Amino acid sequence: MLNGDYYDSRDPELIKMYHKARKLLKEYNNIDSELIQERDQILNELFEFKGPGVWIETPFFCDYGENISIGENTFVNTNCMFLDNNKISIGKNGLIAPYVQIYTASHPLKASERLINRENRSRYLTSTKPVKIGNNVWIGGNSVIFPGVTIGNNVTIGAGSIVTKNIPDNVLAFGNPCEVKKELK
């Protein structure tokens, strides 16, 4: 999966990881917001890495959690969805607005290549590419980050953007598809 090869997302090992993440997410999304240490402990168990000062509003959703790394002092607002079928790395001092979606998974376009039959049940082939977001990045609400995208340092992504390609350092970018609009110096 992490190599970008096609895989079956219903593989027993992945289902085990999925269920572990669901239990931790249920606990996190339902815990009292004043229980800061307990919230941090859950995120530390869920994520590959969580820097100090990371704050994630609830509800928060992800596939496995263990493929997510978030740098110090990053704030993730409510209703974000991180599909971490591959690595998602977010730098320090990030601002992730409500309803941001980060995808690492994709499927073959042709149904005949996407669907596989096993044990009289349809399964779907999936492949993945990592997503990397630099330091000091602000991603506006309702934005979608596609598999394989790298966003540089000191970037602002405007609300509602669909980020399908890499974005360089020190720029304002927005739109569908997301494009660089100006340099930020």
Image (cartoon, rainbow, N blue to C red):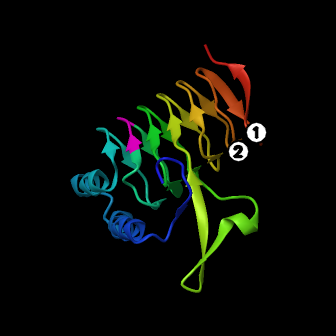
In the image, 144: left or right of 44?
right
Residue closest to the eye, 159 or 49: 49
Please give the range of residues in magenta. Answer: 69-73
In this view, 24 is above or below 39 = below
Residue closest to the eye, 98 or 25: 25
In this view, 42 is above or below 94 = below
**Disc 1 residue type?**
Gly
Magenta residues, dominant SS class: loop
Identify the element where label 1 is drawn: loop
In the image, 89: left or right of 32?
right
- Counting from the top left corner in percent of width and height, residue 92 is at 41, 32
In the image, 129: left or right of 89?
right
- What is the quadrant of residue 171 in the picture? top right
Kindly report the distance in space between the C-alpha atoms of the residues bearing marks 2 and 1. Answer: 6 Å
Find the residue positioned furthest to the top: 185
- Counting from the top left corner in percent of width and height, residue 62 is at 46, 59
**Disc 2 residue type?**
Ile
* Residue topped by disc 2: 162
Residue at (60% x, 64% y) in the render: 125
- Counting from the top left corner in percent of width and height, residue 164 is at 69, 41
* Residue topped by disc 1: 175
Instruction: Mark 2 or mark 1: name the one nearer the start of the chain.
Output: 2
Task: Look at the numbered discs 2 and 1 and tell me whether their residues touch, using CB distance below 8 Å.
Answer: yes
- Counting from the top left corner in percent of width and height, residue 24 is at 33, 65
In this view, 40 is above or below 112 = above
The image quadrant where one finds the C terminus is top right
Identify the element where label 2 is drawn: strand
